[in-house]
Amino acid sequence: MIVYFVGGAIIVALILIYMGIKILREYERGVVFRFGKLHKVKGPGLVAIIPFVDRMVKVSLRVQTVDVEEQDVITSDNVSVKVNAVLYYRVADPASSVVEVEDPRFATTQVALTALRSVIGKFELDDLLSKRELINQELKKIVSEHVDPWGIEIVSVEIKDVDLPESMKRAMARQAEAERERRAKVISAQGEYEAAQTLMEAAKIIAENPTALQLRFLQTLMEVATESNSTILFPVPIDLLKPYIEKGKGGREG
């Protein structure tokens, strides 16, 4: 009889030891409640609790990713867009994440949804497309202020996609095309202006030295002669023949 009693006691002791020994991974922490009250945070590694007295809730410290669903938002310049984002967060205080909020993931997601609508509504469409980093920082700041008391640390909030209406896409395409045409005309006009200045300076140099005009004429004639043309029609400047004409007049007068 005593043998059975001792054997039963050993079995019960082994069961209690099995129930009281827990192993927590490196990225896990155990929030222990004793008689319903918060006792302490344990882990990682081998931890011991009192069976039927302590209750342990495991909390993961790894970074969690939340896909913030697409939202219809109106920008400050009254443009309706669809925006979605992605949220990265981690548990910084395991005890607060268990005691202060029932479902940290759901609560953080709802805060991010509300912040996304309010922040996007403060910016114009052009800023929404060009100032993503500024908007991301503003979103992170607002979400962090709400979830810090819950022991949640926001790693980053990133706007993933901005879906514009088709009419707005066509308008932006026309605007971009007009901007490219404007730049092309400005560049062309700038090139004409610089070319005119260069020609004016060249004309001044030629006017000061008429021989330069003759050299330029001969150079142009040589360039044309290199082409595979059977017939070349080339105008002869009067200034090129002027010395010979004056010399002929002088001989006749003599």
Image (tube, helix red, strand yellow):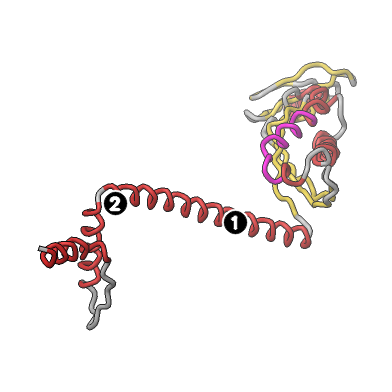
Q: Residue furthest right?
A: 36
- Point out residue 198 in the picture as x, y percentages from the top left corner: 38, 49
Element class at badge 2 = helix
Tell which of 78 and 13 is nearer to you: 78
* Secondary structure, magenta segment, majority class: helix
User: Crowding near pointer 2: few (<14 within 10 Å), some, many (20+)?
Assistant: some
Tell which of 124 and 43 is nearer to you: 124
Tell which of 26 and 127 is nearer to you: 127
Tell which of 171 and 236 is nearer to you: 236
- Point out residue 101 in the picture as x, y percentages from the top left corner: 86, 29
Magenta span includes 135: yes
Of circles 2 and 1, which is in front? Answer: 2
- Point out residue 63 in the picture as x, y percentages from the top left corner: 67, 35
For the point 24% across and 63% down, the residue is 217
Q: Is residue 223 left or right of residue 126?
A: left
Q: Is residue 241 visible?
A: yes
Q: Is residue 3 visible?
A: no
The residue beneath circle 2 is: 206
User: As shown in the figure, which amino acid type bears the numbered disc 2?
Assistant: Ile
Element class at badge 1 = helix
- Point out residue 29 in the picture as x, y percentages from the top left corner: 71, 26
Picture quarter containing residue 97?
top right
Magenta span includes 187: no
- Quadrant location, the N terminus: top right
Q: Is residue 153 left or right of residue 244?
A: right
User: As shown in the figure, which amino acid type bears the numbered disc 1?
Assistant: Arg
Q: Is residue 77 left or right of residue 159?
A: right
CB atoms of marks 2 and 1 within 8 Å: no
Q: Which mark is residue 180?
A: 1
The magenta-colored residue range is 129-142
